[in-house]
Amino acid sequence: MPSTIAILGNPNVGKTSIFNALTGLNQSTANYAGVTIDRKFGRVNCDGATGTLVDLPGAYSLAARSPDELIVADVLLGQRADEDRIDGMLIIVDASNLERNLYFVSQLLEMEIPAVVALNMIDVAKRRGIKVDADKLSEALGLPVVPVCGNTAKGIDTLKLRFAKLLRGEVPAAEVKFRYPGPETRAIGELEAELAQHRDKIGRDVPRIEAVRLLVDEGGETELRVTKLLDGGFPTRLKAIREHAINDGVPAAVQEANARYGWAHSVIDACVTRPPKRIRTRSEKIDDVVTHRIWGTLIFAAVMLFIFQSIYAWAVPAMDLIDGVVGMSAEWAAAYLPEGMLQSLVVDGLIAGVGSVVIFLPQILLLSLFIAILEDCGYMARAAFLLDRLLSWCGLSGQSFIPMLTSFACAIPGLLATRTIQNRRDRLVTMLVAPLMSCSARLPVYIIMIAAFVPARPILGGLLGTQAVTLFCMYLLGVVVAAPVAWILKKTLLRGPQPPFLLEMPSYKTPRAATVFIKVYREGREFLVRAGTLIFAVTIVVWALAYFPHPESVLEKYEGLRTAAANEIADTAALDERIAEIDNLEAGELLRGSVLGRIGHVVEPVFRPLGWDWRIATAAIASFPAREIIVATLGTLFNLGADEDEESPGLRETLRNATWPDGTPLFTLPVALSIMVFFALCAQCGATLMVMKRETKQWRWPIIAFTYMTTLAYIGAFLAYQIGTAVLS
Amino acid sequence: MSAITSTVMTLADLQPGDFGTVERIMCLGPVQQRLLELGMSPGVDLEVIRTAPLGDPMEVYVRGFHLTLRRNEARCVILK
Amino acid sequence: MIEALITGLVVAAAAAYIGRSLYRAARGKSHGCGHCGSDTCASEPKR
């Protein structure tokens, strides 16, 4: 029978690199039922033995304060019906920080199942002058210990041999290394007896380890789960038993920490030699600058500005290339397809629509590259440290920082990342404001508007450009709006005390090319898949709505005009000009008469105060399911209404040439700003709202998010246009 | 209240570069347990490394790693 | 005539695809984990 092994450890101990080293590419991911923690597992084949390796979330302790934290203990104790029984554990510990790691190990030993320990980061420990004697550690733990260096794969071969033994069941079970003090042991016994009486109500036996958590973790997730199943008298009895556990005035939680750290300390004394005085690590020296009062803040601002500037400067050649290919394929299609419906579908619909979205691939790749590098090297924890105070002013904690930052890539993983926030109110506030962060889908809208309508002028002696600064301001807008929104939510709908913020500051490490590449690749692939599926489909439908009914009468009318012009005007150049003018009028009348044109004219008055014509309004409405659709829709709408003889100028030029019926330019700087502000603040993402509903299990929250964001977007766009117009005139 | 704060020294009172030894954790519930799990158990030595640019949170070196926490939580850590 | 038929079929297929996507999203079947490619949602939440 093949074995199932769980891989466990504290966060930031290099679990992922060892998991990757053991499973290679045989990995799959799925979700645990009921929670959105990812269930990552891989097939392993070590030294002829095969089995499954399950990656469990990193944890500091088995004490659970959210449903997600309960996963580790539940899977290990076989309490999840959808999971295989765990036959063994691969425990990863950080050699440079063994003491705190051993706290969790001491809890894992109590599982009393076979285990192998990988002593990771021996290189980091060495640099700090810390030497760990693996043999003595093995003796103290009663388990095989393999020193490894996950980043350089040193020691992985030995680990594989040990792991093969674990798979074959040749490793002895872990043993409990210490006993709880007398009163607590007695209290655990009492609680077990109490729980045994209610076996039929709970519906299963409660393992001893779970009973311990129930006793120690006051208000924890185990307590919530068990109390829900039992009668109203149980909390009182639990309280009484907890009183019995108090030893010399010391509550169970403190006793547990004392006992576990006491044991960890004795192990450390036996097998670790530390320098008499702490050696300052490279990480700490870097942090002296990176988290410095002044330098740290400046570096943070510089890093952010650099990212925005390079998105502009570096992506241009690649964008021009894609632009060229799109333009060529449009010309090619126009030349080979007979004039008519099908040609219009391909040229105006597909190529103009999807092409104008695909062109942003280089920017998406660059942005995700920077985010991946910052995530992998450990800078994100520093950013949380620098900015926590700002978050605390609006009633949130640094815990909200990671979800918010993730939302700059996409709000959906941002919403899922809020699961680490234990406090329900804080979690809801974070979820409600996270979609205000400018996600990568907004980038195309910003880029096209800025590139076409914000004049490029150097700032600070050419170090930055007006365009990059405008982009930076758009990103800043979401943050600036999110702060008061969160503050108001914390004062009204979701009132509550300030949550705790405890975050480990991991050592810096060199980002690994493979990890970064995988993230960038996934992001790029997903962008293209969406451009090729949903956006592709929407483009076709928008084209159809903007093309039909395409009445013969209009075509005949303009054909008549053209014939008349040909008869009247003798000069060829003048005739060409006149014909182009007639073509333009024809395209315009056809578009206005289309289904979409008629709908557009009905809604136009609503958007007129924002400076929008019906085409912009329709494009904005069409992009409520997914905001990047606007670029494709604008491409289709303005291409249909444009003179077809013009040498395919790309969306930027098309927009610059667009006019109101009276001939004045449609897009001005205030209009461009108004569109950008609208898109920065609006909840135009069906998927985000669906995830919000699923995560909160109530329709209320997505409805609130949608309402407040759309209102803010309208007001913001209105102000941007009106103030912009007033300032410019 | 002022009498208590003047006689009891907490982690929040330390400046960057200061050392201290934990006596007990005053807060109850999840905050206490979390602090304990992360190594702030009675008798442990710690060093304040720095505070963030805006004065809060602070970074503490304890049991071989760097932990950041807010002054709010630091006030729960009573020192000897 | 053939042209109109092809166009009609393409548009109908696209409309059907959008309808299906919206339906699936409403049923919560495709929530888009991996929708954005970021693996933050596909891995353990970071602390």
Image (spheres, coloured by chain):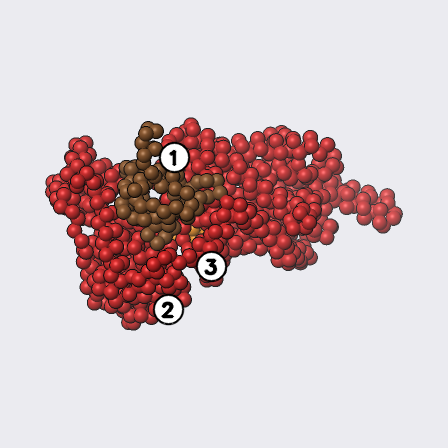
Chain colours: A red, B brown, C orange
Q: What chain does badge 1 belong to?
A: A
Circle count: 3
Q: Quadrant of the N terminus of chain A?
A: bottom left
Can residue A578 be seen here? yes
Tell me where residue A330 appears, x and y as whole percent. 65, 55
Amino acid type indicated by mark 2 = Lys
Q: Say if residue A361 shows up in the picture.
A: no
**Which residue bears the numbered disc 2?**
A154
**Distance from Cα at disc 2 to Cα at disc 3:** 18 Å
Q: Residue at the spot x=65%, y=42% of the render?
A: A550
Q: Is residue A688 left or right of residue A199?
A: right
> What amino acid is labelled 1 in the image?
Gln
Q: CA distance from mark 1 to mark 2?
A: 45 Å
Q: Viewer-proximal residue, A511 or A357?
A: A511
Which residue does the numbered mark 1 point to in the structure image?
A498
**N-term-proximal mark, 3 vs 1:** 1
Q: Quadrant of residue B79?
A: top left
Disc 3 residue type (three-letter)? Pro
**Percent position (x, y) of residue A595?**
60, 38
Res. A501 image quadrant: top left
Tell me, yes or no, whether the two marked residues, 1 and 2, touch with CB atoms within 8 Å: no
Q: Residue at x 70, y 51 (%)?
A: A649
Q: Compared to A448, does A393 lie above or below?
A: above
Q: Residues within 10 Å of mark 3 (few under 14, many from 20)?
A: some
| A723 left or right of A232 in image | right
Task: Please tell me which residue is depicted at 56% across the width and 51% down the height of the picture.
Answer: A307
Q: Earlier in the sequence, mark 1 or mark 2?
A: 2
In the image, residue A314 above or below residue A133: above
